[in-house]
Amino acid sequence: MKIAFTTSDNVHINAHFGWAKVIDVYKISDQGYEFLETLSFGGELKEDGNEDKLVPKLQALEDCTIVYVSAIGGSAAARLIKKGVTPVKARSEQDEIKDVLERLVQTLKGSPPPWLRKALQQKDRNFEDELEEDVTV
């Protein structure tokens, strides 16, 4: 599965979702993780109330299961959830991406907590729903 992190330094989860100029994406499984890409966003990102600024991010993250953020607005969170992406708020802006990834790998090896199982099931279901929609068109 793919996990994304809003970051300003590619080390910490320290960027607000709406204002993030950079989002790092990793592939993760119970075997480990690998860096996939850095998504970059421009424009006037700090403009509150401008919902259009979210569209490129929402589209870019559609195939992610979880996005870790330092903060996120209610509208953005709802739009991510509607796309099957679970937003998760970091404990602090000092949380390091690699630490979260290592904890997730260990969690996937064991018994994931209910919120993670739900996120995984939701993403699987959405993918299957999309396949059915493609077939019926």
Image: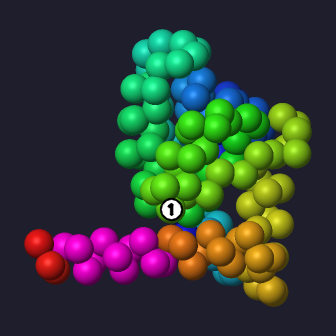
Quadrant in which the N terminus is drawn: bottom right
Residue found farthest to the bottom: 110
- Coloring scheme of the render? rainbow
| Occupied quadrant, residue 108 | bottom right
Left or right side of 40 for 34: right
Quadrant in which the C terminus is drawn: bottom left
Q: Which residue is mark 1?
A: 84
Under mark 1, the amino acid is Gly
Residue 91 magenta = no
109 lies above or below 129: below
92 lies above or below 119: above
Taking the spot 84% from the left edge, 35% from the top edge, the residue there is: 93
| Occupied quadrant, residue 65 | bottom right
Q: Main secondary structure of the magenta part?
A: helix
Give x and y (percent) for residue 21.
55, 26
Left or right side of 119 for 49: left
Taking the spot 50% from the left edge, 71% from the top edge, the residue there is: 123
Left or right side of 57 for 72: right
Q: Which residues are magenta?
A: 124-134
Give x and y (percent) for residue 74.
64, 38
79 lies above or below 53: below
